[in-house]
Amino acid sequence: MAAVEQTRPKAPLIYNPKVRSIAYQAVLCAVIVFLVWSAIYNAAENLARAKIASGFGFWENTAGFDISQTLIEYQATSTYGRAFWVGLINTLLVAGLGIVFATILGFVIGIARLSTNWLLARLAGFYVETIRNIPLLLQLLFWYNAVLKALPGTRESLAIPGGGFLNNRGLFLPQPVFEPAARFALIALVVGIVAAIGYRAWARRRQMQTGQQAPVLWVSLGLVIALPLAVLALSGFPISFSYPEAGRFNMRGGFEVLPEFMALLFGLVIYTAAFIAEVVRAGIRSVSKGQTEAAYSLGLRPGPTLRLVVIPQAMRVIIPPLTSQYLNLTKNSTLAVAIGYPDLVQIFAGTVLNQTGQAVEVIVITMAVYLTISLVTSALMNLYNRRMALVER
Amino acid sequence: MSDIATTTDAKLMAGPAFVRTKPVAPLPPPLTEAGAIGWMRKNLFSSPLNIALTILSILLIVWIVPPLAKFLVIDAVWSGAGRADCLASPTHPEMGACWAYVIDKISFFTYGFYPIDGRWRVDVFFVLLALGVVWMAWLDAPRRDLGVAYFFVIMPIASLILLLGWPLIGLSKVPTTSWGGVLVTVVVSAVGIVFSLPIGIALALGRRSHMPAVRLFSVIFIEFVRGVPLITVLFMASVMLPLFVPDTWSPDKLLRALVGVSLFASAYMAEVVRAGLAAIPKGQYEAAMAVGFGYWKMMRLIILPQALKITIPNIVNTTIGLFKDTTLVFIVGIFDFLMTVEAGRSDPNWITPVTGPTGYVFAAIFYLIFCYGMSRYARFVEARLAAGDRH
């Protein structure tokens, strides 16, 4: 045996798959190392020539610019680090609200597209096909420049029932002012929510054991809404409203919603809802017709059939692409920079970058934020998918 | 009993009075079940909820369509020389869309600041591109292998020479700063496709490779790019790229944006192609290896042709996304179609309250036609592939 192996001509090393694979990978690593090294080398040289500082020391420097919408305390004398947090919170605000409204609108339109009502289904289809095929940036510019900025000025503000005003400087709403006694209502709200969750758990357990159903929806609504309202009435409505008033040039008082914010929210909601509608439609259609027919033959009416049979099964198909739509919405909120809403990109990758000139650090931080959001969301998604995966029997 | 029998017999003797030779024609269905009325009862008014929904839909249509028609057609101005024609006047109190402005500006929207005597070059480029697109999109076209070579090699080089200019053959140089409008939008999309498809295929193969270093690199690249917004990639390309290359290179502004868009689209293309590769049964790989094919031969002749074919609809959908995303180059200061529309809005010759909306509607129609066309094409290919599977 040994003699035979020795006499066999040895194949050149280059035809050995292992050697080849190692060689390919070595070449790839060398190329990447060279690219990274030359990028760092050039960047260091270019920055030194332009006399731009490097490192993250700028984080503590005074920003020196104002921001039109700040949810946390911020002045022009605050640091760049503070400005970063203001921008991040503004991004999360518009993304969070956008996700809520886009989900509602998307589900409504997705279900409307499957309606047996011909006209409604056609209308929903028309909405989806039109909105999906027009770039979001164009829609944002339209909402901002052609709709909101074209509204009448302060003096001819459109009055909104309830004491609000809408003009080309934004939406002005009455702002609730809480007096100390209002904290009882807040406590009642928290108690109500906790009680509603507890009641729901109890009702579910009882239904599992005895089959008796409990009016979960009505009791929960009562606990969450009526209880705080009752406490509020008992304590003599300790809430007053600060109403906006039209000044000579601008509005005074009240709660101000920037037109940039409204335009961005409108645009994101309307655009993303079209995609969510398609996701919902595909999800519902993935539930076979036999499921609906079986539910009907058991005597369920169309409403409970949808709620108890179709939607729970459709959710399994809907949730993964829905999450990616949420991520898209969050990423698309960066288009705020085009209409001047102070989000993370506008403040940080825009103003801060221009003032400090530290492109590398600023862009790296900005990308890291979005990357973190995406990776955390996909990690949660994988967890969910593992839990929801069909258990084969 | 017998009485009846005799009468019957007597009748039979006389022969049958009437024998039906044809079946009775069915009665027409009730008026409410057939025709337009039946259809409406079934599809619009089948239940109280449906009636309410129908009324709601009609109200919605009445609320949206007539004002839109009034703005776009009835009150619109179709010809004029300047802003005076598009301002509300006593004879024309309600002003609609100012199409005169679009007609006046159409060459600006198409070519940007491209020199007027060189615009035929842009037209030739459009024709070359259209030829390539038709060759690639027509599934039964002759010599599609040549088409691939044309689309990915010959056309890009020819277009580059044509658009940038080459004084040696008599084409004067045109800097990219004077490109604009639809030209830039089309260039960015075309470059995005031409580069992202090959890079995407390479990344997808890399992600399925057995070599850990290659796989790791592909995964990091794809997940990183898909995790960040396009704007940050464009910002990176426009402010960081010049730092990363030697000072003397100073890449052109448009080129930076093109690099950003291509890298971004590659990551998405890679995931689309990966899905196609994953759909190819293992037997195909094993059969290819059994006849002695190496990795590249197996991929080129067996796997990729099948994988790419089933991926066409998704590739087209990614292309639609890319086409819409090209508008974002506007944010890093490139004069694309949307930017020319924005710029035209504040042209002192045409500045009126209706100029802005008219420009946006025009741009919306432009994008709508192209994107809708592409999505119809994707659906057509999907249907054709599905029909092929039925055999």
Image: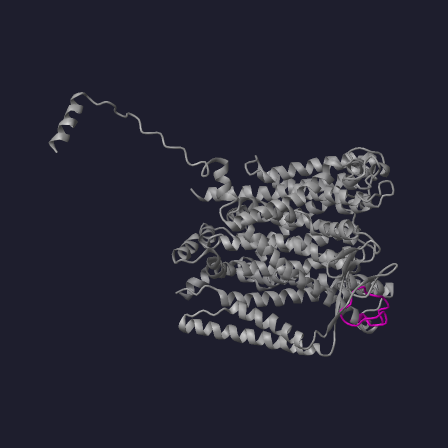
**Residue for point 68% across, 59% down:** A331
Q: Which residue lies furthest to the front in this view?
A: B3
**Placement of the C terminus of chain A among the 4 image quadrants:** bottom left
**Residue at left 52%, top 55%?**
A283
| Lateral position of residue B325 relative to residue A49, left or right | left
- The question of residue A72 being in magenta is answered with yes
Numbered disc total: 0
Q: Is the magenta stretch mostly helix, strand or loop?
A: loop
Residue drawn at x 40%, y 56% is: A294
**Which x, y percent locates residue B364?**
70, 44
Q: What stretch is highlighted in magenta?
A: A62-81
Residue B233 is at least partly visible in this image:
no
Q: In this view, does A258 lie to the left or right of A28?
A: right
Q: Quadrant of residue B147?
A: top right
Measured from the top left, where is residue B64 in percent x and y? 67, 45
In this picture, is A6 found above or below B192? below
Residue in the foreground of this view, choosing between B212 and A16: B212
Nearer-the-camera pick, B81 or B245: B81
Q: Does the magenta stretch include residue B203?
A: no
